[in-house]
Image (cartoon, rainbow, N blue to C red):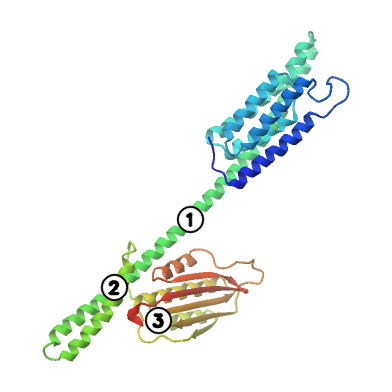
C-alpha cells in the first residue's frame, strides 16, 4: 500500500499539495459576474463550501500520489463521484487527476498500473455522460438532428477525455520504464563488480596456493636435510632449522590469507615476482610509452612472495590502464620499500578535455583494490592535478623486516 520514500521526497510532495490547494482554492472563489453563477465558478455559497472541501480532498490525493498510488487513485475517484453527485461543474482541483494517473503508471504495482489505465478510459466515459446527459434531459424534447449532434459531441468529448487522461498515464508509464531500466543497469553493474571481485579472488587464491606449496616444499626439503646432517654437521642442521623457521613464518602469513578465500580453480605455471618487473617495464616501453621508474629505497633481501605478487599484479594492472586510457605522455612509477611497508604510485596523464574525475573504468580498479586488501594493504585511485594516480600501501610482515 505504501512505498518507501526519502524525507525530502515526502516534503516536496506535501509542499506541492499545499501550493496546489491554495491556487485551486483561489481559482474556485474567482467571481465571474452575472449570469448562471452568483459569486464564484460553482455558484451558491453551499456549493462553494463543497467545492473547497473537494479541493482539499484532491490535494490530499496529490500529496500521497507517490507514497501510495492506489490510495491516491481511490481518493480521487471518491472525490470525483461526490462532485458529480453534488452536480458541481468541473473544478480547478480536477487537474490533480492528471498527476495521480501519472503516479499510478510510474510508481504503482502492476495491478495499480492497469487500474490507472482503466481509470483513464472509464473516467473519460463518466466525464462525457456527466457533461452531456443532464443538458440533454433538461431540454425536454429534441429533434433527430439534435440527437445526432449530441452523439457527435459525446464522441468528441469522450475521445478528448481519453487522450488527455491517457497522456498523463502514458508519461508515467515511460518514466516507469526509465526507472526500471536504471535499476536493471545498476543491478547489472553490481553483478559485474561482484563477478570481477570473485574472479580476482580466484586468481589470488591460485597465486597463494602456489606460494604456500613452494614454501612447504622448502620446509620439507630443509627438514629432511637437517635430519640427515644433524649427527655429522650440527652447524648445517642449525642453518637448516633457521631457514625452516623463516620460511614457515612467511608461509603461515600466506595461509591465513588463503583461508579467507574460496578457491574455485587453479592453473599451473610459475607466479611472477619482483624479478619479472623489468620485463613488464620493457613491454610497456616497447608499446611506445615513456615509462619512468623510481625505486627509493630499494628492497633489502628477499621479500614475502605474497607481497611480491601483490606489487607485481597492481603494477601490471595500473600500467595496463595507463596504456588503454592514458592521454599519452610519460608514465611515472614510484616504488618505496620501507622497513614496515611498501608504497607504490603510478601516475599517467589524462586528456585535457576529459571531465573531472575521468579515468580508467571497469574491473581493473576493483581487482587492484582487492589485491591490496587481501595482503592487509589499501589502494586509492582517482584524478589529481590533470593526471590519474594509483596509490597503494602494502604492509610487510615482521618476518621480512
Marks 1/3: CA–CA distance: 33 Å
Farthest left residue in view: 231
- Is 28 left, or right, of 62 in this rendering? right
Q: Which of the two discs, 2 and 3, labels the residue nearer the N terminus? A: 2
Point 80% across, 13% down: residue = 145
Percent of width and height locating residue 112: 56, 33
Point 66% across, 22% down: residue = 81
Point 64% across, 33% down: residue = 61
Q: Which mark is residue 190?
A: 1
Pointer 3 residue: 274
Q: Is residue 88 above or below residue 259?
A: above
- Is 283 left, or right, of 139 in this rendering? left
- Is 197 left, or right, of 400 in this rendering? right
Marks 2/3: CA–CA distance: 21 Å
Pointer 2 residue: 252
Determine whether the residue tagged by mark 3 lies in a helix, strand or loop.
helix
Q: Is residue 149 above or below residue 167?
A: above
Q: Nearer the viewer, residue 354 or 15?
A: 15
Instruction: Specify few, some or many for label 1: CA neighbours under 10 Å numbering under 14, 14-19, or 20 or more.
Output: few
Q: Nearer the viewer, residue 56 or 82?
A: 56
Amino acid at each position: 500500500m505504501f512505498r518507501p520514500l526519502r524525507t525530502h521526497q515526502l516534503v516536496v510532495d506535501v509542499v506541492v499539495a499545499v501550493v496546489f490547494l491554495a491556487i485551486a482554492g483561489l481559482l474556485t472563489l474567482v467571481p465571474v459576474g452575472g449570469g448562471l453563477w452568483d459569486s464564484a465558478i460553482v455558484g451558491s455559497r453551499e456549493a462553494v463550501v463543497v467545492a473547497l472541501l473537494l479541493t482539499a480532498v484532491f490535494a490530499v490525493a496529490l500529496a500521497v500520489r507517490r507514497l501510495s498510488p492506489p490510495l491516491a487513485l481511490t481518493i480521487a475517484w471518491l472525490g470525483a463521484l461526490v462532485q458529480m453527485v453534488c452536480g458541481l461543474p468541473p473544478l480547478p482541483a480536477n487537474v490533480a487527476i492528471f498527476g495521480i494517473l501519472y503516479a499510478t503508471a510510474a510508481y504503482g504495482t502492476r495491478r495499480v498500473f492497469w487500474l490507472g489505465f482503466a481509470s483513464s478510459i472509464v473516467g473519460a466515459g463518466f466525464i462525457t455522460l456527466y457533461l452531456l446527459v443532464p443538458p440533454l434531459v433538461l431540454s425536454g424534447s429534441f429533434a433527430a438532428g439534435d440527437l445526432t449532434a449530441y452523439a457527435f459531441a459525446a464522441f468528441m468529448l469522450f475521445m478528448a477525455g481519453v487522450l488527455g487522461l491517457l497522456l498523463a498515464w502514458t508519461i508515467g508509464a515511460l518514466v516507469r520504464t526509465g526507472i526500471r531500466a536504471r535499476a536493471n543497469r545498476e543491478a547489472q553493474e553490481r553483478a559485474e563488480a561482484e563477478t570481477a571481485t570473485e574472479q580476482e579472488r580466484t586468481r589470488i587464491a591460485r597465486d597463494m596456493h602456489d606460494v604456500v606449496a613452494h614454501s612447504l616444499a622448502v620446509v620439507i626439503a630443509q627438514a629432511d636435510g637437517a635430519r640427515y646432517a644433524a649427527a655429522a654437521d650440527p652447524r648445517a642442521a642449525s642453518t637448516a632449522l633457521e631457514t625452516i623457521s623463516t620460511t614457515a613464518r612467511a608461509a603461515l602469513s600466506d595461509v591465513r590469507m588463503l583461508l579467507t578465500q574460496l578457491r574455485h580453480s587453479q592453473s599451473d605455471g610459475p607466479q611472477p615476482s619482483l624479478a619479472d618487473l623489468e620485463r613488464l617495464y620493457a613491454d610497456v616501453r616497447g608499446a611506445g610509452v615513456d615509462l619512468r621508474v623510481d625505486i627509493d629505497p630499494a628492497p633489502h633481501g628477499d621479500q614475502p612472495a605474497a607481497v611480491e605478487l601483490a606489487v607485481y599484479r597492481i603494477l601490471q594492472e595500473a600500467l595496463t590502464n595507463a596504456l588503454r586510457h592514458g592521454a599519452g605522455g610519460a608514465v611515472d612509477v614510484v616504488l618505496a620499500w620501507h622497513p614496515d611497508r611498501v608504497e607504490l604510485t603510478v601516475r599517467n596523464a589524462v586528456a585535457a578535455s576529459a571531465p573531472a574525475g575521468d579515468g580508467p573504468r571497469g574491473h581493473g580498479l576493483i581487482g587492484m583494490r582487492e589485491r591490496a586488501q587481501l595482503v592487509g594493504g589499501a589502494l586509492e585511485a582517482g584524478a589529481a592535478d590533470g593526471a590519474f594516480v594509483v596509490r597503494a600501501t602494502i604492509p610487510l610482515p615482521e618476518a621480512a623486516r
